[in-house]
Image (tube, rainbow, N blue to C red):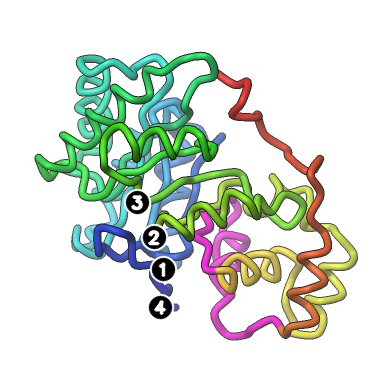
Amino acid sequence: MPTTPTIRLNDNRPMPQLGYGVWRVSNDEAAESVGEALRAGYRSIDTASIYENEEGVGKAIAAASIPRDELFITTKLWNNSHDTDAALKAFDESLARLQLDFVDLYLIHWPVAGSEAYLDAWRTLVRLKEEGRAKSIGVSNFNIPHLQRLIDETGVTPSVNQIELHPRFQQRELRAFHKANDIATESWAPLGQGSLVTNEELATIGRKYGKTPAQVILRWHLENNLIAIPKSVTPSRIRENLDVFDFTLDTEDMRAIERMDDQGGRVGPNPAVFG
């Protein structure tokens, strides 16, 4: 079973650098696919209340009988629950569905354009961390002004910002801000929602190493010190995505992938207007 490298978060907790995401996985599918991922060797699972599959994830975790301290479970607070009471209620409901006493990482899913309620949500997450029910806290889809305001108004820096990031949309400015403020960058849609797995340039690179384009992309994330959470419900691909620790990309290949960056390469919603 592969040993996944970890990123040390700013609260000194280690987080696996490669995890398993379950966006657009049904509740029924989640029990089986997360079980398959855990059997393959994944120990980090990323879900969210809005995915409506926390219950299935919880069933898979319970059935796997893996020691809790070997798992890293992430879930997220949805946009309609940013005020304090609603956030606390949403968190308790997520824990109940997951059948857990705590989560390893709790994220605000979106800042919500035109709203400042994310500040109240963040203060609630700080409280949950102080209580030990969320071991680490962070955000998702936050831009630099959102992050700066959180830091300035609360004095607490998120441990993680989970953002859309892949070779066609590399978010270099935001990543530089993360690095300067000791915020770990986690990539959602690390394969461009599947749009890059048939890319011929990546296939050419992959042939040098006997790897698929998806494996090349995930290796690129790892070598950039990013956390990635690829999603698949196909057992062979679940295992393929984890088979990325036995090679490294050379400088020429890394530069070739860097040149793929495109400011128009976003495949998901823009946080500046979403919510």
Distance in Å between CA atoms under marks 4 and 2: 13 Å
Is 6 above or below relative to 270? below
Residue that mark 4 sits on: 3
Distance in Å between CA atoms under marks 1 and 3: 24 Å
- The region drawn magenta spans 225-249
| Mark 1 and mark 2 residues within 8 Å of each other at the beta carbon | yes
Which residue is depicted at the point 73% across and 57% down? 167
Q: Nearer the viewer, mark 4 or mark 2?
A: 4
Pick whichever, 14 or 153, lies toward us. 153
Q: Nearer the viewer, mark 1 or mark 3?
A: 3
Of mark 3 and mark 4, the one earlier in the sequence is: 4
Which residue is depicted at the point 59% across and 69% down? 224
Q: Which mark is residue 38?
A: 2
Distance in Å between CA atoms under marks 3 and 4: 23 Å
Q: Quadrant of residue 107?
A: top left
Q: Amino acid at mark 1?
A: Gly
